[in-house]
Image (cartoon, rainbow, N blue to C red):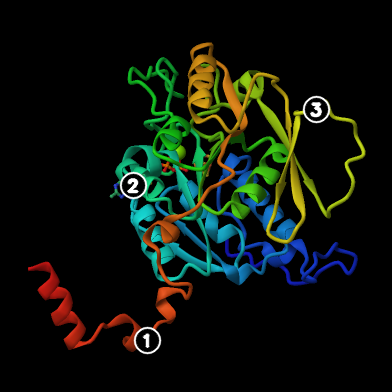
């Protein structure tokens, strides 16, 4: 536990965003994670993404389960709403919160144990219901908080720190997200901030269920030779299919791109991201193609990263349920209760 409080002093020359906030305004408390833990790099990327997006911190509702990864919402956006749920139960709490107040931006932060082991059932239902959220899994292949047992994302044949071999088949969360209807699916690496920040920016702006699987090495229990979630292994096997660049305003494209290789993703304030292809034959709008590409590369031992799938016409659970424009938690009894006479009519129609 650290009891050190972050100093409030700020350098006057710190860059500010369009709201007049510095990056410091998007930080949280000091991290208590191990030095070098991938999860801290992800918190830094989340802070950078929110700063770049010029969104006020109180617009965010951050939810998590239990684990080192699930502790991280305390370390970013200290001025936002937060809820630390029971292990594996965050998705249903997030779904309920989103149903009640669609005005907030929802970010679920979880671990591979929290999502793929105890929380798998919750995760898939949250995705298939089309909840508008950014769901991040900080994937280290182990239960870091409870001292390094293999999680359900650990690859078959990977070696534990004490030499044990994992004999179980892994759950690929990207494949599950694609299968269950996520409209934005990405994979990245905590050690690649250049790739990660624009992916988080794009996911926050996406109007539907956005999932990012982030390989995030646990330096204490899963960063040794024989582990497929170690820094060295991920660096050696990382195959990015595309690259996203943040563009501050609608500036002219000054670089010459080959036709069909660059796509513009417009963000909430009219700024944009440029998606450029690194693999000519990879189409991030083809869900089935994405699944087969991922499986093929995984069989070769490669880890595909980047924006894997993206639906331009995404919508969310509220559109499917045809809810009213106002968030449900702002409605009064008059709007919510049909009254005895109307209720009688409804019941009669059902008899
Ligand atoms: C219902 C319940 N079961 C088990 C636990 C014990 N437990 C706490 S965290 C955790 C696993 C965390 O792993 P992961 O989600 O991958 O997070 P990491 O620590 O690796 O970031 C477990 C099994 C618990 N807290 N609650
Ligand atoms: S035990 Fe592993 S996952 Fe947990 S804080 Fe330490 S390095 Fe990170
Ligand atoms: Mg884990």
Disc marking residue 125: 2
Determine whether, in the image, residue 169 is placed left or right of residue 56: left
Residue 146 in view: no
Residue name at image x 90 percent, y 46 percent: 252
Q: Nearer the viewer, mark 1 or mark 3?
A: 3
Query: Between marks 3 and 2, how big is the CA–CA gap?
Result: 39 Å
Query: From what the image shows, is residue 79 above or below residue 190?
Result: below
Query: From what the image shows, is residue 170 above or below residue 319?
Result: above
Residue 116 x/y as whole percent: 37, 37
Q: Classify the position of the C terminus by image quarter.
A: bottom left
Please tell me whether mark 3 sits on a helix, a strand or a loop: loop
Residue underneath mark 1: 332
Q: In the current view of this chain or complex, which residue is farthest to the top?
A: 300
Please tell me whether mark 2 sits on a helix, a strand or a loop: helix
Q: Nearer the viewer, mark 1 or mark 2?
A: 1
Determine whether, in the image, residue 90 is placed left or right of residue 273: left
Q: Residues within 10 Å of mark 3 (few under 14, many from 20)?
A: few
Determine whether, in the image, residue 277 is placed left or right of residue 200: right
Q: Residues within 10 Å of mark 2 (few under 14, many from 20)?
A: some
Mark with earlier residue (1, 2): 2
Residue name at image x 51 percent, y 18 percent: 298
Residue underneath mark 3: 259
Mark with earlier residue (3, 2): 2
Residue 329 x/y as whole percent: 41, 77
Q: Are marks 1 and 2 in contact (CB under 8 Å)?
A: no
Query: Between marks 1 and 2, how big is the CA–CA gap?
Result: 29 Å
Please tell me whether mark 1 sits on a helix, a strand or a loop: loop
């Amino acid at each position: 536990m650290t009891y050190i409080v972050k100093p409030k002093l700020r350098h006057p020359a710190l860059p500010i965003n369009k709201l007049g906030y510095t990056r410091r305004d998007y930080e949280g408390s000091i991290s208590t994670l191990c030095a070098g833990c991938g999860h801290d790099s992800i918190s830094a990327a989340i802070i950078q993404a929110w700063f770049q997006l010029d969104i006020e911190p109180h617009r965010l509702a951050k939810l998590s389960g239990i684990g080192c990864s699930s502790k991280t919402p305390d370390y970013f956006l200290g001025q936002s709403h937060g809820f630390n749920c029971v292990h594996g139960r965050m998705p249903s709490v997030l779904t309920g919160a989103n149903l009640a107040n669609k005005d907030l931006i929802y970010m679920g932060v979880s671990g591979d144990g929290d999502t793929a082991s105890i929380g798998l059932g919750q995760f898939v239902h949250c995705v298939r219901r089309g909840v508008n959220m950014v769901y991040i899994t900080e994937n280290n292949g182990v239960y870091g908080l409870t001292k390094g047992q293999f999680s359900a994302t650990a690859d078959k044949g990977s070696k534990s720190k004490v030499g044990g071999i994992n004999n179980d088949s892994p759950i690929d969360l990207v494949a599950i997200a694609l299968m269950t209807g996520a409209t934005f699916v990405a994979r990245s690496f905590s050690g690649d901030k250049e790739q990660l920040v624009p992916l988080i920016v794009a996911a926050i702006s996406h109007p539907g269920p956005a999932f990012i699987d982030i390989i995030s090495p646990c330096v204490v229990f899963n960063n040794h030779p024989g582990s497929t979630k170690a820094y060295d292994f991920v660096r050696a096997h990382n195959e990015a299919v595309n690259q996203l660049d943040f563009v501050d305003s609608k500036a002219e494209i000054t670089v010459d791109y080959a036709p069909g290789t660059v796509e513009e993703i417009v963000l909430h304030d009219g700024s944009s991201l440029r998606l450029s292809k690194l693999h000519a034959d990879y189409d991030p709008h083809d869900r089935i193609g994405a699944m087969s590409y991922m499986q093929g590369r995984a069989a070769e031992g490669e880890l595909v990263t980047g924006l894997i799938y993206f639906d331009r016409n995404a919508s969310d659970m509220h559109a499917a349920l045809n809810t009213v424009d106002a968030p449900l938690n702002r409605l009064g009894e008059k709007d919510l209760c049909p009254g005895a006479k109307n209720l009688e009519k409804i019941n009669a129609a059902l008899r």
